[in-house]
Image (spheres, rainbow, N blue to C red):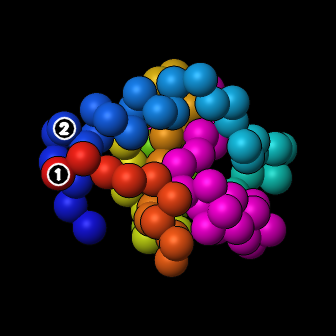
């Protein structure tokens, strides 16, 4: 899935008022957390995930793993917050061309 810059900007605008749906805890990235992110993407299509880590490399690795495992598109990273998009079967969000 490849998004144009116009589509990414549109999705970032929609994501702005959202609160993080999933927040990683002390155990880090577990199967349960991945399942929860997957469910949230199926339900909402556009979500924020909070990755509280002081180590930049570790945070980048965790975010890359989330993107890879959920087959989603990374829109933006702001601080510890990752914005993800993955269209669902019903296509709730209508993207501009």
The span from disc 1 to disc 2 (Cα, nearest Å) is: 8 Å
Q: Residue 8 versus residue 62: which sits nearer the camera?
A: 8
Q: How many marks?
A: 2
Task: Name, please, the residue furthest toward the bottom.
Answer: 89
Residue 39 within the segment the image draws in magenta: yes
Residue 5, numbered circle: none
Q: Residue 94 versus residue 28: which sits nearer the camera?
A: 94
The image shows residue 1 at horizontal and vertical percentages of 26, 67
Secondary structure character of the magenta stretch overall = helix
Q: Which residue is mark 2?
A: 6
Question: Looking at the picture, does residue 20 appear above or below residue 66?
Answer: above
* Quarter occupied by residue 57: top left
Residue 55 visible somewhere in the drawing: no
Q: Secondary structure at mark 1?
A: loop
The answer to whether residue 36 is left or right of residue 85 is right
In the structure shown, which secondary structural element does the residue marked by tag 2 occupy? helix
Do the numbered discs 1 and 2 sit on residues whose CB atoms are within 8 Å?
no
Q: Position of residue 80 (x, y in %)?
A: 57, 28
- Residue at 52% of width from left, 39% of height from top? 82
Question: Seen in the image, is 20 located left or right of residue 46?
Answer: right
Is residue 73 depicted above or below 11 in this figure? below
In screen coordinates, is 3 left or right of 27? Answer: left
* Disc assigned to residue 97: 1
- Residue 41 seen in the current view: yes
The image shows residue 97 at horizontal and vertical percentages of 17, 51
Q: Nearer the viewer, mark 1 or mark 2?
A: 1
Tell me the magenta residue range. 31-58
Residue at 62% of width from left, 55% of height from top? Answer: 44
Residue 30: in magenta span: no
User: In this picture, is 63 found above or below 10?
Assistant: below
Q: Judge from the rendering whether residue 8 lies leftward or rightward of residue 57; answer left or right.
A: left
């Amino acid at each position: 899935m490849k998004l144009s810059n116009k589509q990414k900007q549109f999705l970032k605008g929609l994501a702005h008022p959202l609160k993080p749906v999933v927040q990683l805890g002390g155990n880090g990235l577990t199967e349960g957390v991945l399942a929860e992110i997957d469910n949230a993407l199926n339900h909402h299509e556009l979500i924020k995930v909070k990755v509280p880590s002081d180590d930049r490399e570790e945070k980048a690795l965790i975010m890359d793993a989330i993107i890879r495992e959920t087959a989603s598109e990374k829109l933006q990273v702001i601080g510890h917050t990752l914005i993800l998009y993955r269209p669902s079967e019903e296509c709730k969000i209508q993207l501009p061309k």
